[in-house]
Structures are given as structure tokens and as C-alpha cells.
Image (tube, rainbow, N blue to C red):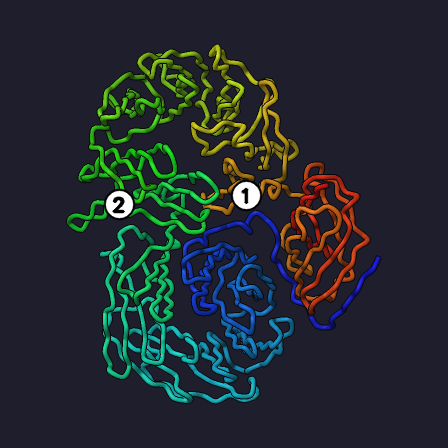
Amino acid sequence: MTRLLIILFFSPICLISQINEDEFYNTTDFYLQIHKIDNGEYLFYGNRGGIIRTYDSGDNYLQNYSGTKSNILNLENHKDYVVGITNNYEFMASQDKGSHWIVSKLTDSIVSMDASDSFIVMASLFEDILISSNVGKTWERINVEGKYFRDVFIIEDRIFTIDKNNSIDYSDDFGKSWTNIETPVELFDGNFVAQRDNNIITLRNTNNFFRINGNQIIKHTYQSDFIHKYIANEDGYCFANANSNTRKINFYNYNIEAKTEKLESSYTNPYFYGNTFRVVDLVVDNNLVYLTFENRAIMKSTDYGKTWEVVTYTPILGESGWPLKVFDEKNWSIIGKSLIYKSTNGGVTFKPGEDFLIDTSEGKIDKAIINDCHYYNKDSAIFFTWKFYSSLKSDAIYTTNDGGNTLKSLGSGLPNDARFVADMRDYLIVNTEKIIGGTKGRLRVFYKLSDENNLDSINVIDSVYSNFLSSIQYHNKIYLFYSKIIGKDDKISATIAVSSDSLKTIKDIFSFESDSVNSISSRFLMKSQNENIYFVVDTKSGNISIPSYFRIDTKTDMIYQVEKPFKILSGYYKDGVYLEDQQYFRQEEFIVEDTSFRMNYVEVSVQGTELVYDTLGENKNGYLPIKIFDSDKVILTGYQNSIYKQKEPDRLTSIEQTESRTENLPIYPFAPSPNPAKEKIKVKFYTESMDKIGDLKVHLVNIATGIKEEIKDYDISFTNNWNGEIAFDISDFSIGSYLINLSIDDYNRSSKLIITK
């Protein structure tokens, strides 16, 4: 074995970047800030470490995860790096403009950071300034007695600080001596913000800008009622605000020589919702302007604010809309409360439609919610609405032929809460619930919607319990799963019915009657290509819900109890999907020892009439995998219904994946080359330090079998103190999919390899 070992003697910063489920989180919670790398190159970053990138002034957007779940406070450019800090006292650095990140846990309570090409400076809350000229590998600590910092900035080699006592000071000798800048009395009246834009440091309070010029401060007064975010330039300032009552967004330009303030544009956007409806961040690059808002909203202008384009606005699904609809790897859709959001780049950005179901007459902002929908393809769909208030003027049925960008009304012939049942090709079948004499007497009324958009009532089911009713269409049959009240004692019956004539007649084929019946569960209800439908009936034992598992033979309509119980949770899978198509599920496993439940990822197949599944790994957060049909990718949606980036199914496995830890030295492997490979491969890697490279272990893990074999005979070389390459022979390994795992102590990361012959 040939090894070239280089040991470097400086203190390593321990990193926490780790391959795990959260790496694929593709939206960044509630707020997005903006960092300019260079002309046309921007990073949009937020509360949970997700980053959206553009390298071409916004023509295309990419998604990356930074390796931290914390709130990224700010990012700055340093040499060829982008560096930043988080509110959890972490330092982060990227050498490839935000594709990959090194995240280090700091021991100081860092409150502010700035960077230049020469060095990085951080200010801790208590008396310390930290300076690094080697991308955070080592830090020089400077104690400034009696200072409790809030901001630190760099102009060339001069360090400026603002402390909690509202004192502004600067140092030209890296903190050895400090000079105080006399400040106007009104500068610190009330709340103020401070920032650096290129070589300009400004502070803003209620009605004034204060610009630091050498060791003096110059004041400029503005007339706008309030400012959410501003940018300083040589000529003056650009700033923006948003009004939560009118939903109006204003963009201003202020010229300091002429002392003039100009409203460049006033744009109303009624579908941006947030607690305060404020501008989160602003960046200006010649005529290119970006604004960000709450709810992960980004707006872009290419004519200095005269016209605006909504880049992305992604609602939180659990609060603002429906599950994700995936047509292929690029085309996704979300049904919001009153809007359709469409993505054409695999979920990186979602653009809202032009037509939204909101009544703004007489100052009202009431909503008509999209209650259900049926997609024919990625562009054509029909939507049924539900009205919050009787005063709303929106209709009940809408169609679209452009993916939800514009909606066409079909009139208000349907009742308020219509839902989709089945598509019989010649016409749609929908249902709605009618309440008669209070909550006990309920009717399920089915309608057909013809090509001429006429509505005809075709059948009624009475005494439906609650609002649960689900359906599956199999060939020319429609199966209805519902619960209804029976008898004088209002007992509940879990019922399944079938219709072979488009609901003109309905026949009950299954009735589960018991005092303990809860309902037919919607947790798992799927059809298989083997002509069976699998479903669950829940019964109650105390406060615990006990499932029973069944299948319907659609050839005979006979019901059979499944001998081998399954606990697979299906979530949001729709009528047009076969179990075999979906393939990947989340499974709930009961742990006898402590009577708890554990979520796993499982791959499901059908053998005969039984469901067989292989456990791929633990699903700690209960994420729901959604298969992209005609693709090898799946998408994870989160427990809060956030959207996750697509990934290969073998990345669902938990082989050799551990929790992120801050005390271990990391190593990041890039994709092997060549891939697929037959004989020899090379794997480039990036590491924070070579201090422990002698402890590096290389394993090859067969994804199908889980067999792990250590590679002891490998060559290793280095291009600098942080980048290296290993090479080894794979000719003795069989054909298949593998994980190349690099580990140092307890820290490990993997990359995928395909071996061919």
C-alpha cells in the first residue's frame, strides 16, 4: 500500500456537515436573505440552512444545503470563499460559491462578522475580536476591555465596531489601539440598524441615514414613512417597504447630492402573506433588483423596479395548501389555499398563478379555498372551491390549461364543498355533503359534470359519518370507502361500496360494525396491479387506534383479511397511482420493549396477494417519499409538509449514516471518476485539515446486501492543504450499486458508485 501523508500543525475547526435527510431541504423556512457573490451571482439563504443559487442573474436557479439547520445571520466574500456565521455560533465557508460548505462549531458567542480579501473578523458579545487570514483555520483573539459588541465591519484594513453602549470605534492596527468616532445625538434615538455596502458603512434610525466618512458621520434625512430594507451606494440610497393592509410594495431611490427621494415603483401583490408583510432583504446590481419577503418569496426586476417578476413563493403545505403533485423530475405543482404554484425546475422555485381566488372589494381580503382538484396532465386541471364567507363572489368550479397560471370559471352550479370522486372519461364525478337537521343527518350527493359543464345529481348516500369519504377507480368500477351512522344508537359502520355504472347504482360490499369502530383509515388506501385494493379499518381500544388490514379482489368484489399485517403509511398518493408505481413508503414499526413507534423507509413489492417490503433505514422525521414516475428519483416531504429535493432511492438507506457531531474531523468525498467504473476509480475529497488524514478509512458498501468491505490498498495524493484524491482497484467487486464511504473516527460521508463489467 502506498500512502502519502501530510500532517499540518494548526488547530482544526470541527465540522458538522453530514449526509442526512435534512441535506435535501429545498426551501428555507420563513425568510430569505440575499448575498451577492459577483455580478449576476447570488445566494438566497434562510433560517434552516437551505440555499437557492443563481449564476446567471436569475435565468436559472439551483438548490443546495449548507450543512447547518441554524439561522444563517450573514454571508460575505473572502478571497475565493464565501464565509458566514449562524445564530448558533457556527462559522461556515464554501470554496465553490455555495455548492458545498464546511461548518464549524465556535466556542464564542459571535454576534457579527465581516470579511475582506485580506482577513475575516468576528465580534463576540463579550470583549473579544477574532481575526483570521486563513479561512477560519486559526483565529487570533484580541481582547477589548469593557466592550460589548453588536456590529463589526471592515473597510480595506480598518476595523469598525459598534458596541451595546452605542459607541463607534475603529482600529488601523488589527485591534491594538482604537479611535472613537463622535456621533450625532439623534443617531441612537430609538432603534437603529447598521450595515456595510461595499466600502460604505451606514446606520439608519427612524427618519435618517448616517454615513461614516473617515472619522466623521454625515446625516441624510428621508421622507418615507418607514423603511424595511435599504442599500447604500456612492450616489445615495435605494430602499423598500411593504404595507400589510394594502399589500403594496414600494421601491425608492434617494440622491444625496440633490436631496431628492423618488418612488421608482409601487407594486401590489395580494397573494404574499406573512405575519407582518415586510421586505426581508434587498440587493441592487445596476438595473437588476431583488427583493425578498416573508413566506420565502423572491421578486426580481430587470429595469430598476419599474416592473417585477415573482421568482418563487412556496407556501407551507400544512398551513397554506395541499400536498405536492409531481409530474416528472422538473414539473411539480402545489395547490395553495387560493392559488396554484408551479415549478419547472424540480421544486427549486415555485411561481404563483396570475389568477387568485380572493375578494378584495371594499377592502376585504377574504378567501375562497381550493377544496379539491383533478389533474389531467401537468397543464390541464379542474378545481372545486369552498367559500369561507357567504359574501364571497367566487364561483365553485374552475379549469386551467396552463398549469394553474390562469383560471377559467365554469360557474357556481356546485355546492360549497364539492370534492373529486372519479374521472369516467366522458364526464367527471364529484360529490358534496349536505347536512340535514343538524350534524347527525348527512347526505353524500354525487354529481356528474358533463363536457358541456352541466351538473346532474346521480345518487345519494345518507347518514355519512363525519366528512370522511374516499374513492378508488379500478377499470370501470368506482369503490367508495366511508363510514356511516346506523341504528338508533348512532353506531358507526365502516362501509365499502362499489358501482359499475358511474354511481347510478351503488352496492355495499363490506360493512364492519362494532362499538369500537373508528373509521376506515385514509392512512393506507391503494390499488395494486394484481387487481386488488388494500385498505385499513381502525378500531379503538381506549385511546389507542388498532388497525385491521384487508384487501378487495376487484374481479369478485370479495373482501379478505390480510394475514400478514402491514403498517405502511401512504399519505398523499392519488387515485391514478398503483402501489407498484409508488414503490417507496414510510412504515410505522411498533417497538415492544418501550411500547413506542419508529418510522422507517421501506421498499414495497407484491408477491401473490401479499405485500412484501424491505426496510431501507430509519425515517427519524417521518418524511413521506414520493416516487417520480419514469425516473429513479424520489422526493421527501417533511412532517410540516415542507418540500424536499429529489434524490436517488438508495440514498434513503441509513447504512453508515450517523448523527452530525461537532467533535469529529470531517471529510467530504466528491463523485467518483469514472462512474460507472470497471477496474480503477479515483475519488477527490475536501477536508478542513490534514491533521488526522492518517486515520482515514475507506469502505465499499454494497447497497443491495449491506455488506461492507474495507479498502486497505489505496493511493492518496494532495493538491493543497484541504484537497486530495484517493485511487484504488475495484475489479474484484461484483456488478452493482455501492457506497464509497470515507471515515475519520466517528465521522463519515459517502458517495455513490456503479460497478459494471
Residue 83 visible, this orientation: no
Q: Nearer the viewer, residue 666 or 467?
A: 666
Q: Is residue 163 left or right of residue 392?
A: right
The residue singled out by tag 1 in the image is: 621
> Which quadrant: the C terminus?
top right
Quarter of the rendering containing residue 498? top left
State the SS at label 2.
loop
Q: Is residue 462 left or right of residue 475?
A: left
State the SS at label 1.
loop
> Which quadrant: the N terminus?
bottom right
Q: Amino acid at mark 1?
A: Asn
Q: Is residue 718 above or below residue 258?
A: above
Q: Is residue 668 above or below residue 402?
A: below
Residue drawn at (78%, 58%), measured in percent from left and top? 715
Residue drawn at (55%, 84%), measured in percent from left and top? 175
Residue drawn at (43%, 23%), measured in percent from left and top? 519
Q: Which mark is residue 355?
A: 2
